[in-house]
Amino acid sequence: MDFKNEIAKQIAHAAGLQAEEVLPFLEVPPNAEMGDFAYPCFRLAKVLRQAPNQIAAQLAEKMQDVAFLQKVEAAGPYLNFFVDKSLFSRSVLTKVLQQQADYGKSELGKGKTIVIDYSSPNIAKPFHVGHLRSTVIGNALYQIHQALGYHCVGINHLGDWGTQFGKLIVAYQKWGSKEAVEEQGIQELMRIYVKFHEEAEKDPSLDDEARGWFVKMQNGEEEAIRLWKWFYDISIREFERVYKMLGVSFDAYTGESFYNDKMAPVVEELKEKGLLKESEGAMIVDLEDENMPPCLIIRKDGGTLYATRDITAALYRKKTYNFDKCLYLTALDQNLHFAQWFAVIKKMGYDWYKDLIHVPFGLVSLESGKLSTRHGHVVLMEELLNQSISETSRIIAEKNPNLENKDEVAKQVGIGAVIFNDLYNSRIKDVVFSWERMLNFDGETGPYVQYTHARACSILKKAGNTFAADVDFSLLGDAASTAVCKLLADYPAKIAEAAAKLEPYILTRHLVDLAQAFNKFYHDNPILNSEEATKNARLAVVSAVAIVLKNGLALLGIQAPEQM
Ligand code: ARG
């Protein structure tokens, strides 16, 4: 039984409304003394032509005899509901314990397809912490939508095409060596790329040479493609090491190069629709009526652009997946790029342009200042994750030196901490890396939630991993137990809310709340030393909490070790 739903029905019945009109406004009061749920009657004042206080008093009167409600009270303009605690905990706990790993899943998105374009790093450039956000948020949104029954398609739109690869080829031929690239990988590619820019400042003819090589790539010439493919393979190998650490995978690695032979018909279509205009030798789509600078489609030298490939990719994805929504996860600074080419799709007459959604996020910084990519002082993902793991190992060695699979746990916790830190705030906020804060086992952190889960597992283990099926739910009437049950009950709605807002933090914060409520429950209520029936009922709570924390962490892309 869904109490919130039932209460909405009761209010609707008493006030002569539809339950759907009531449900969205039912609140959970910050303080349980004010009730388990509350309904503000202001919004009925207009319809019923009465003062909110009066309405609250009358509705309270009408609802005295509802079986699952202990009492209904009017408090000023609010209608406060106190549910029958034992019925409530029975309903929630039974459901969690029955559904286990499926608790929280639903069919809300059944029959709908959502394409998620995330991570999408650039070939021959380091996988830096800026791409961490796209990867981690994208993966969480993927898992969350999947739990809601959507068909998800995760796409890594690699930056693997463009004039920069012409530059890289020139740089390699002039200053590179096969051995160095094979040994140093992306780092060496980055070194010669930076060198190219330094040299090109003195000698602009290098840029022409680079453009020439990119034209060769576009024409599929053998030597150009061979070198490009080699840079590609080296880069992918490094990226995949990071994906493996993060536990992230994709349904398709269709990067920008995939669209090389698909752009011509799209450019043709733009022409036919009268959207292409010449401007200083280049081809553009004018966006003046949308109050934006023009979208550049073809460069003066005939080269295509990032936007040309994005437009082509969108048409391809619509045709291939017939998505209901297509999400793009990038930093906020690409806002204009997406707004521009979304407008081009609109001008082409495709009404699904409104299903293209840019999902932006803020910057990442270390405590020492903003991270930069262009000047070589990059913070590499792999280094960062390894550092987190080694810091975590150190903490574990102090706290729990006898832990069995220490290395494995350090990995799960170290990486979990980084992911959690990234998903803790609304996307648009900048993320700051502070080891001290991220790895604080008592803070609002990944390790804290994982630790709480491990604590629950250890209690269950000490109880022999079983408890009797006939739980006496009337023994769970205390405030701490009720608080835990409420958060357990709210968990499925939080998943739906996180998806609707495209904000994983809704879920992250809920897990912190649940962990905190559980620790209070654990502090207030002896478990293993209690008398048999009470112990049994409390173990049911512990077990349900372990299940929900584990399920929730999984949706965020974080593992839940049973010991730590
Ligand atoms: N490669 C781009 C970057 O690193 C991100 C690509 C995002 N996806 C897209 N379809 N534009 O900035």
Image (spheres, rainbow, N blue to C red):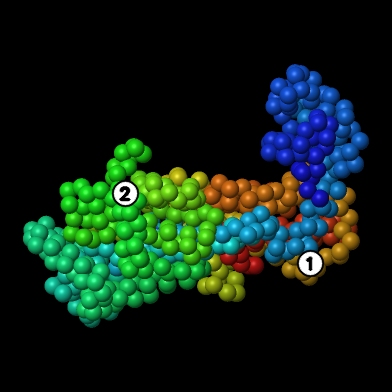
**In whole angstroms, how far apart are the C-alphas of marks 1 and 2?**
74 Å
Counting residues from the N terminus, which is met first, the one under dot 1 or under dot 2? 2
User: Vertically, is 305 above or below 52?
Assistant: below
User: Vertically, is 40 above or below 198?
Assistant: above
Q: Which residue is mark 1?
A: 463
Q: Which residue is mark 2?
A: 274
User: Vertically, is 129 above or below 562?
Assistant: above
Foreground label between 1 and 2 = 2
**Residue 463: percent from the left, percent from the top?**
79, 67
**Residue 285: percent from the left, percent from the top?**
30, 48
Q: Secondary structure at mark 2?
A: loop
Viewer-proximal residue, 4 or 472? 4
Establish whether ligand 1 lies closer than 8 Å to the Cβ of label 1.
no
Spot the residue most to the front.
Answer: 272
Q: Is 555 left, or right, of 155 in this rendering?
A: right
Q: Is 259 left, or right, of 409 in this rendering?
A: left
Q: Is 354 left, or right, of 518 in this rendering?
A: left
Q: Residue at x 87, y 58 (%)?
A: 471
Spot the residue most to the bottom.
Answer: 179
Q: Mark yes or no: residue 10 visible.
A: yes
Q: Residue at x 76, y 22 (%)?
A: 48
* Quarter of the rendering containing residue 537: bottom right
The three-letter amino acid code for the residue at tag 1 is Ala
**Residue 506: percent from the left, percent from the top?**
58, 48
Viewer-proximal residue, 157 or 433? 157
Indicate the quadrant containing the C terminus: top left, top right, bottom left or bottom right: bottom right
Q: Residue at x 51, y 47 (%)?
A: 425
Q: Mark yes or no: residue 443 visible.
A: no
Q: Residue at x 39, y 50 (%)?
A: 348
Viewer-proximal residue, 429 or 279? 279
* Quarter of the rendering containing residue 167: bottom left
Q: Secondary structure at mark 1?
A: loop
